[in-house]
Image (cartoon, rainbow, N blue to C red):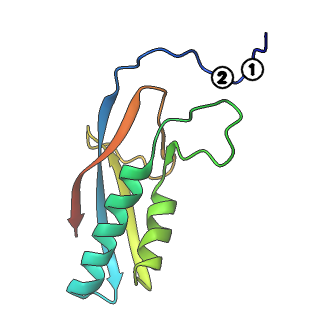
Amino acid sequence: DHTYPFARPATAIAFTELNFDVDFSNLTPNTSEVRAAIETATENYIYARRPQQYADEPNPINLISAGEITSEAIAAGAINITVVLKNAGGSDISATGYELDDSELAVPRTLTWI
């Protein structure tokens, strides 16, 4: 009989969707093409976040951060951009980000250009 300390029990988990809002400002170049690419990259990034499956999982993707969204925006064509990440209550969580727990799934709600 083998037991693995990192394996989770095979139980059904009811997931809760958490909404995240992102405010963008100070975009250079500020074109409709770059904005669209940034919106797509941001939505893909948020939807790809998921709870960590194992305690020793390599490269877990359970953290949502403004820094990573900024990196996605730069990869999508931004030279300069300011990103503010907010939880569904509207609180700025840019400095800390958010770590999904075992039963949470991230969903982008509103992407706003300021």
Camera-nearest residue between 112 and 50: 50
User: In the image, what residue occupies the spot 42% across and 46% down?
Assistant: 93
Image marks 2 and 1: residues in contact by CB distance under 8 Å: yes
User: In the image, what residue occupies the spot 30% across and 83% down?
Assistant: 34
Distance Cα–Cα, label 2 vs label 1: 5 Å
User: In the image, what residue occupies the spot 47% across and 14% down?
Assistant: 11
Q: Which amino acid does label 1 sit on?
A: Tyr
Residue 95, how many percent across, how many down? 50, 51
User: In the image, what residue occupies the spot 75% across and 20% down?
Assistant: 4
* Whether residue 72 is situated above or below residue 45 in the rendered picture: below
Tell me the element at label 1: loop
Q: Circle 2 sits on which residue?
A: 7
Q: How many labels does the image show?
A: 2
Q: Circle 1 sits on which residue?
A: 4
- Displayed quadrant of residue 58: top right
Residue 41, how many percent across, how many down? 36, 68
* Whether residue 8 is situated above or below residue 61 in the rendered picture: above
Residue 12, how many percent across, how many down? 41, 17
Tell me the element at label 2: loop
